[in-house]
Image (cartoon, grey):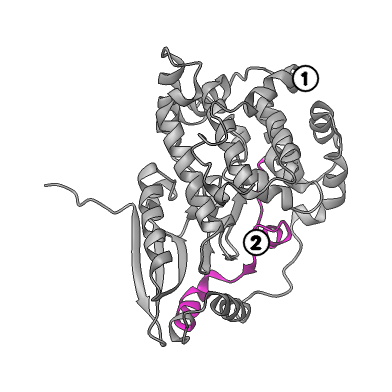
Amino acid sequence: MHSPVTAAINSKEITTAGGLRIGVAQLNAEKTLNALTLEMIDLLSAQMTTWAKDPEIAFVILEGAGERAFCAGADLHRMHQSAVTHRASPARDDLRGNTYALEFFSREYRLDYFIHTFPKPVLAWGHGVIMGGGMGLMAGASHRVVTEQVRIAMPEINIGLYADVGGSWFLNRAPGNTGIFLALTAAQLGSSDAIFAGLADYTIAHTQKTAVMARLIAHPWEQDAVRSADELTQLLQTFEEANLPSGPLRQNFDCIHRLCRHQDPAELVAAILAYRHDDPWLERAAATLRAGSPTTAALSIALQRRLRVSSLAAVFRAELVASLACAARPDLTEGIRALLIDKDKNPRWAPASIEAVTAAWIDGFFISPWTASEHPLADLGNNAD
């Protein structure tokens, strides 16, 4: 007896009181916390494209299946396999030779950019775990809801990648130097800190989701995206939780901003590790940084600083180059091996310390194998930036 094939993306359309429809796309991989696969990216991209062109679709909702996660990131096992194969091949010196990584990252970033620039409102219902690639989907939504059970983080330092999926753009817009701190430490944020960091817009109790949906369906939406966005804002505000207590990011803002002001990456990391306190959240953050990839730490700082005034499209183009370089260098495969393959939690980073990470080593992550016109994401932003 064959098991039924489960769709990687569940999509449906709900008719509202005015006759227009709401498009609902659900990431449907509950067992893996809705981790993104290339199939999911392609299916979601196709569905979003259809809805963008359909005048009868008022807006779109993104959500995750189950009660544990919106999306916990990307499926890393295939990424590990492709990187190992590429590094053992004659094409190991050509970033473009890792065809799986090239296809995955370029199509993922294209989808993320599409959500950022979608011509209609996008409501992301952020419940449970939202990490890595999940934040890539969430960050671009026009209306980002988080629940009281949300756990947001960019944990790529644990695997030798970096806070990609536009993280070099949206973390740069977090208050003070908190964006660099979050990229270096994989610190987890709850709902109030997600709003403080600019990663979410509303906190709504998850128990209210049914009531929110009922109001959305009962509303007479019209074919005016700007008006729909305003009305959606007003509707969500009626469910919003008020007077949320400050989270640890906001409570420790002053010291985080001060610690991350150092210009030299090694001094910045040393300052975080040397800071004495009795806050368990800061302690976990420092422990993660201490155990994480030194290259990731230096690269994360460089990306945020070098791309500070870049457009979103330019950021995604730079991140594609950096991500392919990560796949071609030692730390990504080693980090995934230690965390998910052998599970020994003992990665051997190369270079082994941030003091050993040279400027030339980091510069290599910015060298594109394409001319500007040949870049796979050259058309983002209509090449205007």
For the residue marked with disc 1, what is the amino acid?
A: Glu
Whole-Å distance between the Cαs marked 1 and 2?
35 Å
The residue indicated by pointer 2 is: 191
Task: Judge whether 150 appears above or below 362 on screen.
Answer: below
Residue 57: image location, x then y, percent: 41, 73
120 or 257, nearer to the observer: 120
The answer to whether the residues at label 1 and label 2 have Cβ atoms under 8 Å apart is: no
Residue 204 lies in magenta, yes or no?
A: yes
Camera-near label (1 vs 2) is 1
Dot 2 alpha-carbon crowd within 10 angstroms: few under 14, some 14 to 19, many 20 or more:
many
Magenta-drawn segment = 186-215
8 or 65, nearer to the observer: 8
Task: Judge whether 358 appears above or below 249 on screen.
Answer: above
Residue at (86, 39) in percent of width and height: 261
Residue 263: image location, x then y, percent: 85, 33
Residue at (50, 55) in percent of width and height: 114
Quarter residue 150 falls in: bottom right
The mark found on residue 355 in the picture is: 1
For the residue marked with disc 2, what is the amino acid?
A: Ser
